Image: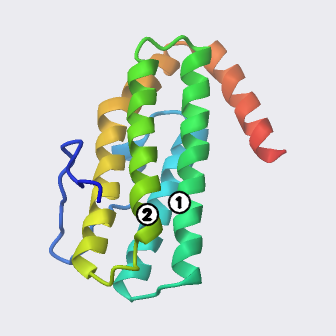
Amino acid sequence: MTHLSRHSYSSSYSSAGRRVADWSPSEHSVGLDPLDHDHNLIFIALGTLENELKFLRRGPTLHKTVKFLSHLTERHFAREEHLMERLSYPKAREHREQHGLLTAWMEAVLPSLGEMRRPSYDDAVVAYLADWWSLHNERHDKHYGQFALERPHETGNILKLMEYSSAA
């Protein structure tokens, strides 16, 4: 079993028991619309996953949500990494490593989610993911966002291509 606190991300529980924060432009925006949109979708998928586990929805519905969250994460990481590479972002390697760690963790943990029938385990997984995304956004994504915004012409061209390739 993979250790949940491997990367020093802690769980944060609200008084209502909800662990997944809603995506907020004022709190989470990196200033780049396509990537902010990705982040918003990921937070929505995390909230959906949390609700399915809370209401004990197992089987195909849970499997589809896990698969969708994994797909969103993979797609988002590829888009971020492409942008960072094209802009020669100096911390791109470190950022990619963070992505690789989460991807490996998700591949190890998510397939068994909901199967162990231990709500505390499921809660810990969702809390870890929610905290990882919030902290990663704050500690890493906002930095590449600022770097990209300092290069508006080049960034604009890359983002246009990104939006075009997403629509295709």
- Between marks 1 and 2, how big is the CA–CA gap? 10 Å
User: Which residue is at a point 54% across and 56% down the rendered structure image?
Assistant: 70
Q: Quadrant of residue 11?
A: bottom left
Residue 45: x %, y % from top left: 50, 64
Q: Which residue type does callout 2 highlight?
A: Leu
Please report contact status of discs 1 and 2: CB closer than 8 Å, yes or no: yes
Q: In this view, does 20 lie above or below 161?
A: below
Q: Mark 2 points at which residue?
A: 110
Residue 112: x %, y % from top left: 42, 70
Question: Nearer the viewer's eye, disc 1 or disc 2?
Answer: 2
Q: In this view, does 43 lie above or below 132?
A: below
Residue neighbourhood size for the residue with mark 2, other residues' Cα within 10 Å, grouped as few (<14), some (14–19), many (≥20): some
Q: In this view, does 7 lie above or below 121?
A: above
User: Which residue is at a point 71% across and 21% down the rendered structure image?
Assistant: 157
Residue 134: x %, y % from top left: 32, 48
Q: Is residue 54 above or below residue 122?
A: below
Q: Quadrant of residue 152?
A: top right
Left or right: residue 37 versus residue 47 is right
Q: Which residue type does callout 1 highlight?
A: Leu
In front: 127, or 151?
Answer: 127
In front: 48, or 3?
Answer: 3
Q: Identify the disc placed on residue 69.
A: 1
Q: Can residue 146 be seen in this view?
A: no
